Image: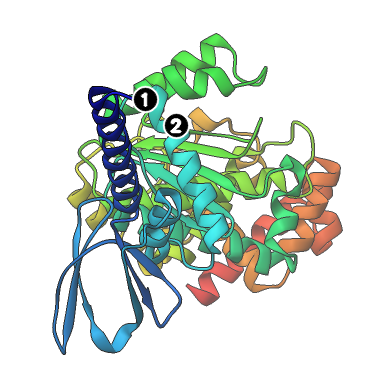
Amino acid sequence: MTRNTLFRRRGLAAAVAVALVAMVSGLAGVASGDIITLKDGRRIGGEVLSENSRLVRIKDDAGNVEAIRTGDIEKIEKGVDLDPAESRAERDAPFMPGLSLRERMKVGAEAERFSGPLGFKLAAAARPHVWVFGDHPQLELSRLADKVEATLVDYADTFGVPVDEVLSASDAEQLYVFQFRQEPQYLRFIDRIYSRMRDETVNDARLKLMKRQKGFWVMTPRPLIGRYMGPSTMQTEVSNASHLTSHLALMLHEPAGAWMPWWFLEGFAVWQEIRVTSYALTYCIEVSRPGEYAKEGTPDADELAKAKLEKAWRKKVKARVRRRDERDLAILGALSLNEIELDDVQQSWSVVDWLHRTDKLVKFTRAYKEHRELDKALNESIELGVTGAHERWRYWVLQHY
């Protein structure tokens, strides 16, 4: 063996050693993060920036810096990376109360799946039966999710059934809500997401109508609400979402084919909207053209001043009854959606309120779905026909409002 050959082999061995060191160093560098485990079980992955006796500052995997009290920390692991999906699910925990880590990861995966076709990142908030996606801050989406879940729970409690039973007809465990700040993002959602998932219940004409509206709700192929805020306030969006959720619950629970009496759907939805959000901000203002359902006719400040609370609606209904200016119940029951005006919605809400407070609402609703005729439903539930029921309601309003 010549000296040059020996040198080359020694040089090769040295190069291999250097490469191995580089590989080991590189592999060690993969696990360069830190994990803080909190006493509530939540874990935060990222880079610990500073520590003292009171606070630990960590930059999470999304680039956000969070200061955590040392008393809330169970342990700190250095040089250990957290899986990105798990890291996101842990960050989402405050906006998804009641969901396990695995469920939060599923919500995050759905948000990622929808973000791709849209071309912008969706935030998410969730409750056990409601998953909300949108371009709003998570805190706003969480507020909306809270009231939508509360509407489903209120409906289930009213009928004495589990929430899962309310949604069972759809074979879906969750209601999806897509909430956007402006119209362009809403239209992109319809074009790139919803148009691909719609079924035969939404034809091309209805799809075009949805694009002209501020929002929509559908029952199939899964319960879904889509909306955008525009110049409205978040209070209005929350109230509207509660209202539309009530429509879905009423139609999905113990479904009755094409049964859709608009006076009752509107009255029931406003009744729930007030119970859950304290406001009635969703109703027909103008009915001159199709597609104006749930459209705000005035700025939100005027909406809040006009709609106010249940007390204001009681006062308005009682004034109409005193003047005998209310709509005949038989006529009210036959109105189509675009024929219903604000006064009609207030009267419909009052009829639902009366039925509930006299313990007849559940029995009436089930009878209405079974017979699909107002007169038969009233006879079965309160043993009065339409005319007698109308007079009974009038007397009750004068006594209780």
Q: Amino acid at mark 1?
A: Leu
- Considering every residue shown, the one lying at the far top of the view is 204
Left or right: 310 as drawn, with respect to 151: left
Q: Is residue 392 visible?
A: no
> Which image quarter: residue 333?
top right
Q: CA distance from mark 1 to mark 2?
A: 7 Å
- Across the whole image, how many numbered discs are drawn on residues? 2
Decide: is 48 above or below 31: below
56 with respect to 219 (left or right): left
User: Residue 135, position in %: x, y?
Assistant: 30, 40
Q: Position of residue 201 (x, y in %)?
A: 66, 21
Residue denoted by label 1: 118
Which residue type carries mark 2?
A: Phe
The secondary element bearing badge 1 is classed as helix
On the picture, is 214 further left or further right than 216?
left
Please tell me which residue is depicted at 52% across the width and 64% down the height of the picture.
Answer: 150
| Image point (32%, 82%), residue name | 73
Crowding at mark 1 (Cα within 10 Å: few <14, some 14-19, many 20+): some
Q: Nearer the viewer, residue 68 or 140?
A: 68
Residue drawn at x 40%, y 46% as measured from the top left: 282
Q: Which mark is residue 238?
A: none
- Is residue 272 shown to the viewer in this render? yes
In depth, the one of 157 and 185 nearer the eye is 185
Q: Are marks 1 and 2 in contact (CB under 8 Å)?
A: yes
Helix, strand or loop at label 2? It is helix
Relative to residue 50, is residue 93 drawn left or right?
Answer: right
Model colouring: rainbow
Q: Position of residue 345 (x, y in %)?
A: 48, 47
Can you tell which quarter of the image residue 65 is in? bottom left
Q: Position of residue 179 (x, y in %)?
A: 37, 40
Residue 114's disc number = 2
